[in-house]
Image (spheres, grey):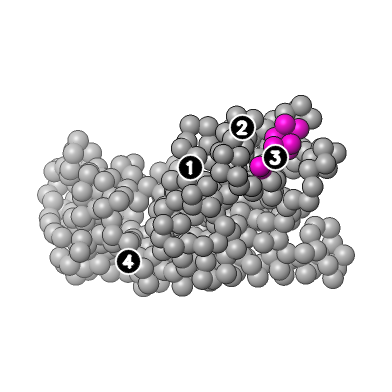
């Protein structure tokens, strides 16, 4: 086994899933008893496991969530859904993405729940379902201002009747997606919220029967209980991270940690440079630890001279360029560092911790990208 491995703590995943559930139940209970606005009945959870479960490994994560009681999972495309069904997942699987250029057979053959976000997707699924003599349940996506996928919120009277009349399609749910839920000052969130409410009333006017509603990603879930509706759709929170700049009192634990081992320790003299481009110059005698993890493992090149790793319970700065298979850290001020010592890139060591949100901050990105980019050559160990 390689030195650089990701440890995926399925116990932490289950605990996060339950913490979200408890939070939703508790807040709704308070709404009920204290007569506060907001939902009085706790919403269900659609657990988001797209993009290989944010890099954690979709099969194992989905199985753990199913065992923990998840009643619906969500993926980005048909291929991801087929992979989960093939691995034995039995709960409903919602496909978020567009179906326009996909091979639709998987939807029928593997019992997936598609999102219909355009008239063309509706036509294609209706004819597929008719050909098989089946009735297909689907979720309808409304574009309330993200301007990506979905039926525009402002002309539903014109665009929806044909879809709603499709003989072999059954509307199960209607949803939307927020563009700025993690930007507390942004007015688009409130605009999207009210547009979605209006769209739901339009569906009533069009006679689109009983159906459930969902809208909230992790940030929206934390931000405003009025958008919980019947289901929430957390991804990042399940993996133990709160989207910046939001905070939460939920007891979440990061699910992934990333560790390696020092493969060489070496001295560098004053004036010498380190690594590609000679980007780091020693201005004092420096002791370097060489760590076999690089951008091929998903560690961003921008971490060079900006990030840290944990060695012997202390922070060591990454110096020089992050290369494909290696990086170097300055351990001059840390006593007794030797070959074979454990290095923590994400996770805890002693009383120090680095999480994906902090790593994202160092390089000007978001924790989502840190997690999803973890390289395929990094072995995931499940505990
Ligand atoms: C990815 C995604 C989510 C989950 O987002 P988080 O910010 O990780 O909670 C929810 N809904 C849709 C439509 C998504 O694409």
Q: Is residue 370 left or right of residue 25?
A: left
Q: Earlier in the sequence, mark 4 or mark 2?
A: 2
Give coordinates of residue 264: x percent, y percent: 13, 59
Q: Is residue 37 left or right of residue 168?
A: right
Identify the residue at horizontal 64%, vertical 30% (top origin): 119
Marking on residue 167: 3
Marking on residue 123: 2
Q: Earlier in the sequence, mark 1 or mark 4?
A: 1
Give coordinates of residue 349: x percent, y percent: 35, 69
Work out how far the residue at label 1 is from the one at label 4, CA to CA, in angstroms.
Answer: 33 Å
Q: Residues within 10 Å of mark 3 (few under 14, many from 20)?
A: some
Work out how far the residue at label 1 is from the one at label 3, CA to CA, in angstroms.
Answer: 19 Å
Q: Is residue 65 left or right of residue 274?
A: right
Q: Earlier in the sequence, mark 2 or mark 1?
A: 1
Work out how far the residue at label 4 is from the one at label 2, CA to CA, in angstroms.
Answer: 43 Å
From which residue to which does the magenta span run? 160-169
Disc 1 secondary structure class: helix
Q: Earlier in the sequence, mark 1 or mark 3?
A: 1
Give coordinates of residue 97: x percent, y percent: 53, 40
Marking on residue 37: none
Distance from mark 2 CB to nearest ligand 1 atom below 8 Å: no
Front tag of 3 and 2:
3
Disc 4 secondary structure class: strand
Marking on residue 381: 4
Identify the residue at horizontal 40%, vertical 71% (top origin): 351
Give coordinates of residue 22: x percent, y percent: 65, 70
Disc 3 secondary structure class: loop
């Amino acid at each position: 086994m390689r030195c650089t491995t990701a440890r995926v703590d399925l116990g932490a995943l289950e605990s996060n899933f339950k913490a979200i559930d408890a939070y939703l139940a508790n807040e709704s209970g308070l709404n009920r008893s204290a007569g506060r606005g907001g939902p009085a009945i706790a919403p269900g959870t659609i657990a988001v496991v797209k993009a290989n479960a944010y890099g954690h490994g979709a099969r194992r994560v989905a199985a753990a969530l199913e065992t923990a009681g998840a009643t619906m999972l969500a993926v980005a495309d048909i291929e991801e859904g087929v992979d989960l069904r093939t691995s034995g997942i039995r709960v409903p699987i919602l496909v978020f993405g567009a179906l326009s250029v996909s091979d639709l057979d998987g939807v029928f053959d593997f019992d997936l729940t598609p999102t219909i976000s355009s008239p063309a997707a509706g036509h294609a699924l209706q004819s597929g379902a008719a050909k098989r003599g089946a009735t297909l349940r689907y979720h309808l996506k409304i574009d309330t201002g993200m301007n990506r996928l979905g039926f525009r919120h402002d002309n539903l009277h014109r665009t929806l009747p044909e879809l709603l009349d499709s003989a072999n399609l059954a509307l199960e749910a209607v949803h939307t997606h927020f563009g700025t839920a993690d930007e507390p000052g942004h007015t688009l969130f409130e605009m999207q919220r009210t547009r979605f409410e209006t769209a739901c009333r339009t569906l009533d006017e069009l006679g689109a029967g009983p159906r459930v509603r969902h809208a909230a990603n992790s940030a929206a879930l934390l931000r405003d209980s009025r958008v919980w509706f019947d289901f929430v759709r957390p991804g990042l929170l399940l993996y133990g991270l709160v989207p910046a700049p939001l905070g939460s009192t939920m007891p979440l634990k990061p699910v992934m940690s990333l560790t390696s081992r020092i493969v060489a320790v070496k001295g560098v003299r004053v004036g010498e440079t380190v690594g590609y481009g000679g980007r780091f110059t020693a201005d004092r005698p420096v002791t370097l630890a060489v760590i076999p993890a690089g951008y091929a493992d998903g560690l961003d090149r921008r971490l060079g001279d900006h990030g840290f790793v944990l060695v012997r319970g202390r922070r060591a700065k990454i110096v020089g360029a992050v290369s494909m298979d290696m990086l170097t850290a300055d351990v001059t001020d840390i006593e007794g560092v030797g070959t074979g010592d454990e290095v923590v890139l994400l996770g805890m060591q002693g009383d120090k911790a680095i999480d994906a949100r902090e790593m994202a901050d160092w390089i000007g990105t978001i924790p989502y990208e840190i997690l999803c980019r973890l390289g395929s050559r990094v072995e995931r160990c499940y505990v």
